[in-house]
Structures are given as structure tokens and as C-alpha cells.
Amino acid sequence: MRRRVLVAAIVGLAVTVGAWSPGQVATSQLPLRLADADFWRLVEEFSEANGFFRSDNLVSNEDTFQFVIPDLQRIVRPSGVYIGVGPDQNFTYIVAVRPKLAFITDVRRGNLHLHLMYKALLELSADRAEFLSRLFSRRRPPGLGATSAPEQLFAAYSMVTSSREAYEETFKAIIDTLRTRHGFALDDEDIAGIAFVFGSFYAGGPSLAYASGGGFGRGRYPTYQDLQMATDGQGTNRSYLATEENFRTLKALQHNNLIVPLVGNFAGPKALRAVGAYLKAHGATATVFYASNVEQYLFQDRRWPEFARNVAALPLDSSSTFIRTCFNNCAPNSGYRSLTMLDSMQGLLRDFEAGRVLSYWDVLSHRR
């Protein structure tokens, strides 16, 4: 009861930027593992009502998202808390910065369904080759092992057709893992949502891509395969499927229930505030916030100041870093659709409080 009162009190406090000292991280009391009941309680209690976005957003459309990872690793210390949005590009950032805990917050409940699917598949799969076999409902080709490069993995699976039998077998295993083994209270709409997501990977295979308004999106957007074989711009592939070590890191976090998907608007009244209260109650710091281009929509809806105040309710330190993405006009004549940038979270909030952040362009111009 005293802990619930403490958390409620923290949510109500006004937070001053810079009030959180990096030295407090030493007292972090984040759990090494969340019990199944605690994981689901966070999902239910921190989430907001289901919202709308124009795309199902099953696969990222950001072709340069790895480019910031070398700088991100120099700036951000491991063992903080990661916050992100959207599909599985979060996993690549997570294995790069090695947080103790991650929250992935998205306005659509469909994104929660996507991450529950990934959680089950990662827990069920012994290695990358088995994971891809389950994800695409294709029988595992021979000759794949721990040292297989992503190019070899995808070349092998391009020669295998999807199997309805494999799909049904794996979908049953996904639901059994989530509802029976973990005991998550999935309702019929959740089951249908997971079925839609998994069915999209079954139908689209490695060529599944972002599509505005639905569909498989083959064409001008990078495919799932493209993104898993991309590099950081310096020749190193840092994706979560680049190596078995990356895969095992991600699998361990999922096994320990330490990647928590939430439903919430960045400018909403509950999700980010609840995350901030939880981190403060556990002496933890938000070190990375992957925002993609959500701020663009928040400015369009005139809600960005509410987002800034929600961010100010998070415990931060001088290393706390935004990752954000700008499309089209930010990367003219580069051959890329997007530009990924890093920014100081405390620095942006200080400028916001000083009245120097008035437009989306002010945000895009504000870089670490």
C-alpha cells in the first residue's frame, strides 16, 4: 500500500529538468526479472485507450536507423532504461545500448500485439535460424548455424515457401506461450490482433514492408530483410539478427519479461507519466528515448508541449538521449528516405522551458 501511495505521489509531482543526478543510478533497484503477473500488470495499468495511426506499421520505414548507433554507444551508458515506439527496430537499439529494462509505447494496441508476437517467438526459438523459420512459417533449411551471416540466413529462406501447417503450428505455440505459460489475460480482440500480425508475416515473408493504409508494401520502402541486412553506414551490421550474441541478448530480455509493450499517446495523460513514476520509485534513469517522427504528428495536433511535460516527468541525466527520425526533406539527394538524429533530452527540455522550441523545425534543428 505504501508503494502504491509513493508511486501515485510521484506521478503528481512537477519535475524540474536537471533535478535527477547521474549518481542516483547506483541505487537502481530495477528487478532482474519481472514476474509474469507483474509484467502484465504494467501492461494493463500503464496503458491508455487504443488510438489510431494510418498504417499498421509492422515493419520500419527508416532506412538509416542504424547510422546513429556508434555515437549512441559512446554517449549512453548501459544499464539504464530504454523507451521507444513502433516495431522491431527498437530491438536493434536495445541490443546496442543494453538497458536493464525497456518500455515500448505506441498509440496503437496493434503494436502491442506485434510485440507480444515477437516476445513469444523469441522465447520459443533457440537461435536466429529457428526464429526466422517461425516468423515466416517456413521450414528451416539445412546448413544454417551460429556463424551464418544475415545474408546467408535470408538467402536460404528465400528458397523455402511458406507452409500453412507451420503457420498453424506456430500460431498455436504463440498463444499457448502468452496465455497458458505466462498467464497473460488476452481477450478475443487481442488474439485476433496477434493473428493479423502473424498472418501478415506468413503472407509477406522476408519481403514484408511498411505500407501506409495496409497491404504488404513491396516497393519503395525497405523490407524486413533489407533492414536486417542494413549497416550503420560504416560497414557494420548492428541489427538484432546480425549475430547470435545480439539474438541471445534480446532473447534473454524477453525471457525475463524486461521489454514491456504499452498502449499510449506520447502526449497522453498516463503511459509516459506512469513509466516515469515507476523509474523514480526504482531509482532508475531513462537513458534512451526513441521517438521516430512522432513529434511531427504531435505538432500537427498542437500537443507537443504535453509530450515535453511528460518527458520532463522522466528521471534523466546528462547522457539521456533522444533518437528521432526525419523523412524526405531532411535527406535530399542522399539516396535515403530518412535521416536519424540524436539529441540531448535535458537540453531540449531546457530550451522548451526557455520558450525556444515553438515548431517541429526547432525540434529537428536541436541535436546533440
Image (tube, helix red, strand yellow):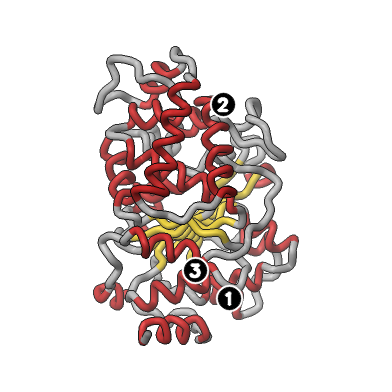
Helix, strand or loop under label 2: helix
Q: For the residues labelled 1 and 2, say whether their Cβ atoms are less than 8 Å apart.
A: no
Between the C-alphas of marks 1 and 2, the distance is 40 Å
Labelled disc at residue 309: 1
Q: Nearer the viewer, mark 3 or mark 1?
A: 3
Residue displayed at 42% across by 17% down: 155
Residue name at image x 39 percent, y 16 percent:
156
Secondary structure at numbered mark 1: helix
User: Camera-side residue: 76 or 271?
Assistant: 271
Residue 320 drawn above or below residue 114: below
- Tell me the quarter of the picture where residue 216 sits: top right
The three-letter amino acid code for the residue at tag 3 is Glu
Residue type marked 1: Arg
Percent across and percent down for residue 32 are: 25, 61
For the residue labelled by badge 3, is the local secondary structure a helix, a strand or a loop?
helix
Q: Mark number for residue 45? A: 3
Which tag is nearer the camera, tag 3 or tag 2? 3
Category of crowding for the residue at label 3, using alpha-carbon neighbours closer than 10 angstroms: few (below 14), some (14–19), many (at least 20):
few
Q: Mark 3 vs mark 2: which is more N-terminal? A: 3
Q: Nearer the viewer, residue 217 or 48?
A: 48
